[in-house]
Image (cartoon, rainbow, N blue to C red):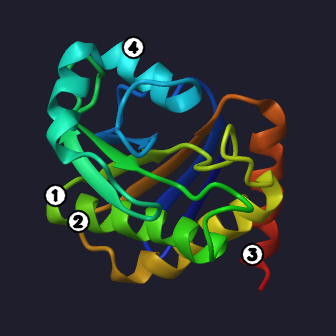
Amino acid sequence: MTTKNIHGKVIELLRGDIANQPDMDCVVNAANAQLRTGGGVAGAIHRAAGPELEEECRPLAPIRPGEAVITAAYNLPNRYVIHCLGPVYGSDKPEADLLAACYRNALRLAEENNIESITFPAISTGAFGYPVEEAARVALRTILGELPGLSTVKKIRFVFFHPSDLKTHEQVLEKLGKE
């Protein structure tokens, strides 16, 4: 695990199960437009949360790339789930702007709902095909840019399923810290 303290906030990068982060107020779902269960992160979160999550999501859908909505977490060990629709790489343009909007909108919802700790996956890097290193640069640059304006959010965690995704994000964070 990598931990950095920046602007009075804690940023953590670790390998694990995003649906099992009991010390965090909120998890972010790498959602599909219909906010339904699927593979990857969305499947893991929906399976752990139970059918009530999909029920609450139904009237909130569809969402567009870059948008985010918030729901209860049901059987997850968290209070909230923020659902973000990341861009499909090569299809949704401009990809970097839409991906950055996911992180900004999730943090905005976190602030509005007095969430102190939030867990992100690597949005759009699975089935949506966003190259991991490029997505890591967008995600971490956006998060670092938002830190000074956050008043409620104190801890931001990234959780990765694949060890290589963790390593890539650690390297990108290290590089960004030197800019």
Return the disc, 2 or 3, that comes first in the chain's sequence: 2
> What element does badge 4 sit on?
helix
Badge 3: residue crowd in 10 Å (few <14, some 14–19, many ≥20): few
Q: Is residue 165 left or right of residue 30?
A: right
Give percent across and percent down for residue 149: 34, 82
Q: The N terminus is located in which quarter?
A: top right
Residue type of the residue flagged with mark 1:
Asn
Per the image, the residue denoted by label 4 is: 47
Q: State the CA–CA distance, disc 1 to disc 2.
A: 5 Å
Q: Quadrant of residue 63?
A: bottom left
Return the disc, 2 or 4, that comes first in the chain's sequence: 4
Residue under the point 62% across and 73% down: 93
> What element does badge 2 sit on?
helix
Q: In this picture, is 70 found above or below 48? A: below
Return the disc, 1 or 3, that comes first in the chain's sequence: 1
Q: Visible in this render: residue 20?
A: no
Q: State the CA–CA distance, disc 2 to disc 3.
A: 24 Å
Q: In this picture, is 95 found above or below 65? A: below
Per the image, the residue denoted by label 2 is: 111
Of residues 8 and 54, the one drawn nearer to the viewer in this rendering? 54
**Given contact means CB atoms under 8 Å apart, are the residues at marks 2 and 3 in contact?**
no
Q: Is residue 46 left or right of residue 59?
A: right
Residue under the point 16% across and 58% down: 114
Q: State the CA–CA distance, disc 4 to disc 3.
A: 35 Å
Residue type of the residue flagged with mark 2:
Glu
Per the image, the residue denoted by label 3 is: 176
